[in-house]
Image: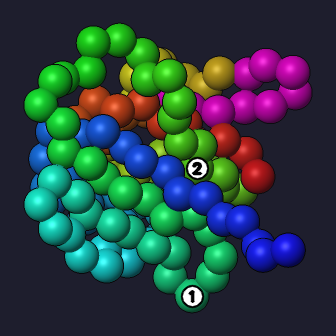
Amino acid sequence: MSEIGFGLVLDVADPDRLAPFWAEALRYSVVGGVGNYVILLPEGRGGPRLLLQKVKEGRTGKNRMHLDIVAPDIEAEASRLEALGARRLENGQVEEHGHRWIVMADPEGNEFCVGES
């Protein structure tokens, strides 16, 4: 049986503008783009591909799915991501069921979390 992989697709207004942010945030490489798409792949390791897809309609509510970036020091990682253009959506950290995370948004407002590894 062949191996199955998966990719993630993020609907965005401007994939070319957002690709450098997500490449740095995830330590991925921008492979290239065509038309309404830009693809990013992990650098030298396994992981899902990320496709940024240009859409006309804007986001109207909370994302139905979001990315979680996992790091040993979530405050340091959140600060690194803020320097890249992300912003915190809530004051402080969220703690639930013994886990902590910080709710953030990319430069277009797409939510993601930075959580403990």
Q: Magenta stretch containing residue 56, yes or no?
A: no
Answer with the quarter of the image where residue 39 lies.
Answer: bottom left
Residue 73: % across, % down:
66, 53
The residue closer to the viewer here, 90 or 57, is: 57
Magenta-colored segment: predominant secondary structure:
strand
* Residue at x 51%, y 34% (from the top left corner): 66
Disc 1 element? loop
Whether residue 50 is visible here, answered yes or no, is yes
Q: Position of 6 compared to 54: left or right?
A: right
Left or right: residue 75 versus residue 5 is: left
Look at mark 1 in the image and give the residue it sits on: 44
The span shown in magenta is 95-103
Residue 76 seen by the camera: no
**Image height check: is 21 above or below 100?**
below
In the rendering, at what x and y percent does residue 76 appear?
A: 54, 53
According to the picture, the residue beneath numbered tag 2 turns out to be 69
Q: How is the image coloured?
A: rainbow
Which of 81 and 38 lies nearest the eye of the viewer?
Answer: 38
The kind of secondary structure element at disc 2 is: strand
Q: Amino acid at mark 1?
A: Gly
In terms of depth relative to the viewer, which is nearer, 102 or 53? 53
Residue at 66%, 41% (x, y): give it.
Answer: 115
Residue type for callout 2: Ile
Which x, y percent locates residue 84? 29, 55
Labels 1, 2: front one: 1
* Separation (CA) of disc 1 from disc 2: 18 Å
Query: Badge 1, how many Cα within 10 Å: few under 14, some, many 20+?
Result: few
Residue at x-position 59% and y-position 43%: 68
Give the answer, above or below, for where 53 lies relative to 87.
below
Name which of mark 1 and mark 2 comes first in the sequence. Answer: 1
Rendered residue at 49%/65% (across/down) = 49
Residue 110: horizontal and vertical position, in percent? 34, 32
